Amino acid sequence: METGTVRGRLCRQLEQVAQNRRLADLRIGLSYVGVKMDDGAAGIAALLPGKTSRGCTILQEAGAYAGSEAVEALKFLAEGKDVLHMALAMAVANALIRVPETLEEDREATTYFNLKPDEKVAMVGLFAPLVRRIQETGANLTVIERNPERRELLSPVDKVRALKECDVAIITATTLLNDTFEETIESLGSPRLVALIGPSTPLAPEIFLGTPVTHLGGAVVSDSTKVLQVISEAGGTPALRPYLRFVNLML
């Protein structure tokens, strides 16, 4: 599967509905991008550390996003311009996706994993709150992290082995934003469960057809005013949590 395949699917799936929507507000913080649509719906996506243009102008379109067509921002999903535009596009996508309000909130994604003692779990991207819960089940956890400040890095050989041999794979949705999602799932052996989780997760099951993903754990904005304020004030996931509804979808 080519890099960016799933993002391209998401772009095509939402293109029609995006034609009728405009951005009402855009906030770019240090950790997240948040958008609010003209119909009140809102979405967020992680803003990853990476190369963006520096100088007096970072976003040439700054000052023109409010009132702009959502479909223009959505196109960055397919174009993969840079980390900032990618996060903007994913936030727009997450605002456009309609998640049923009847879907119950559940912040404990690990309850869906049914982990057993001695099972091998590969966690791609450190989810610190989940580490203790996973270890308490007796499962063997290996964390694959790209940031050496967050976790000791695995050797390339150990990384490949962990993905190939795992029974359960827990993958951060930011892999969709840094062009490593397709590479990651292609490296998997035959895990019984593959979960894509995190606030950036697009809750659109159709785009994952033909992939090994079996579980989507994402977030729906429940208080857009507070979410946009937190992002503007450089807040991260802990500060956003009270204003998000966490949901799980089994594919």
Image (tube, grey):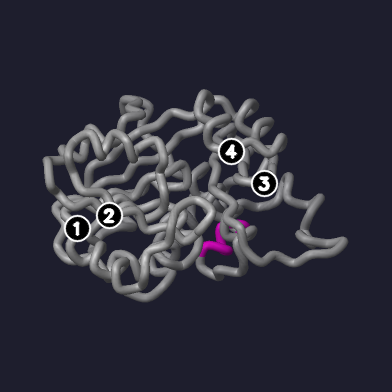
Q: Secondary structure at mark 3?
A: loop
Establish if 155 lies above or below 141.
below
Q: Which mark is residue 166?
A: 1
Residue 214 locus on image (x, y percent) = 22, 50
Establish if 13 lies above or below 44.
below
Q: Which residue lies under the disc numbered 2?
A: 122
Q: Secondary structure at mark 4?
A: loop
Residue furthest toward the right?
A: 56
Numbered disc in front, either 3 or 1: 1
Q: Which residue lies under the disc numbered 4?
A: 236
Specify the amino acid type for callout 1. Answer: Cys
> Of callouts 3 and 2, which one flags the residue occurring earlier in the amino acid sequence?
3
Which residue is at a point 59% across and 32% down the rendered structure image?
40
Q: Secondary structure at mark 2?
A: strand
Relative to the observer, which residue lies in front, 251 or 159?
Answer: 159
Query: As drawn, is 100 to the left or to the right of 65?
Result: left
Q: Which residue lies under the disc numbered 3?
A: 30
Measured Cα–Cα span from mark 3 to mark 4: 8 Å
- Magenta residue check for 73: yes
Q: Classify 10 Å Cα crowding around label 4: few (below 14), some (14-19), many (20 and above).
A: some
Q: Magenta span covers which residues?
A: 72-77
Measured Cα–Cα span from mark 3 to mark 2: 28 Å
Query: Which quarter of the rendered picture does the N terminus lie within?
Result: bottom left
Measured Cα–Cα span from mark 2 to mark 1: 6 Å
